[in-house]
Amino acid sequence: MNWIIEEQSILIHAVITAVTMLLVTMFILKINGLRSLAKITPLDFIVTITIGSIINSTLISDSNSIVKGGLMIAVLLAFQTLFGKLKAKYNWFDKNVYNNPVLVMRNGEFLKDNISKLNISETIIISKLRENNIKKLSEVQAVILETTGDISVISGEEKMDDILLNNVRLKI
């Protein structure tokens, strides 16, 4: 019958651990700053999944203490912050560790090679164009697949500043 109903002390321990892990995680995220909750990059995704796993193992297992779980979360977020600082400071780190945004449309023309290599479809891009109220492909100056997976659309008659395409790969 233990697999249906737990002893009261085990249930109380689980509730205290869950609330404590929530508070510890919130505290660590507050210290780490908004970067932890920004648009998600592949590294952010991995950190998020791992934090969930740590919280889960801390809640479920008696062998993982709250201090150990909190420490593991703090270490992960510290590495996430370190990687963010290295990315901002060193171009080589950014290029070798992270993906750069990729141009998928330029001056109203689909860049079919890039689209094919990225394994996305023109349908997804067209949907994003509609979301941005694009009525004609000729209105589009650039469409960029961002590192977060978002698609950015730059349109209008006024020529865009070249800085908007800094670090954007024109060809894969």
Image: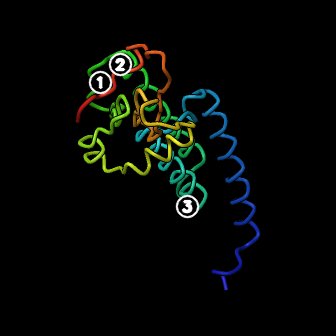
C-alpha distance separating marks 2 and 1: 16 Å
SS state under label 2? loop
Q: Relative to 9, say whether 166 is above or below.
A: above
Q: Nearer the viewer, residue 61 or 25?
A: 25
Amino acid type, label 2: Asn
| In this rendering, position of residue 139 left or right of residue 11 | left
Residue at image x 47%, y 48%?
50
What numbered label is drawn on residue 2? none
SS state under label 3? loop
Q: Marks 2 and 3: in contact by CB < 8 Å?
A: no
C-alpha distance separating marks 1 and 3: 37 Å
Percent coordinates x, y for residue 72 in the rendering: 49, 41
Amino acid type, label 1: Phe
- Other-residue count near label 1 (Cα within 10 Å), few / some / many at <14 / 14–19 / ≥20: some
Residue at image x 37%, y 21%?
165
Colour pattern of the rendering:
rainbow
| In this rendering, position of residue 13 left or right of residue 64 | right
Percent coordinates x, y for residue 9 in the rendering: 74, 66
What numbered label is drawn on residue 61? 3
SS state under label 1? helix
- Other-residue count near label 3 (Cα within 10 Å), few / some / many at <14 / 14–19 / ≥20: few
C-alpha distance separating marks 3 and 2: 48 Å
Which mark lies nearer to you, 3 or 2?
2
Disc 2 designates what residue?
Answer: 166
Q: Marks 1 and 2: in contact by CB < 8 Å?
A: no
Of callouts 2 and 1, which one flags the residue occurring earlier in the amino acid sequence? Answer: 1
Disc 1 designates what residue?
Answer: 93
Q: Residue furthest bottom?
A: 1
The answer to which quarter of the image holds residue 138 is top left
Residue at image x 58%, y 35%?
37
Percent coordinates x, y for residue 94 in the rendering: 32, 25
Amino acid type, label 3: Ser
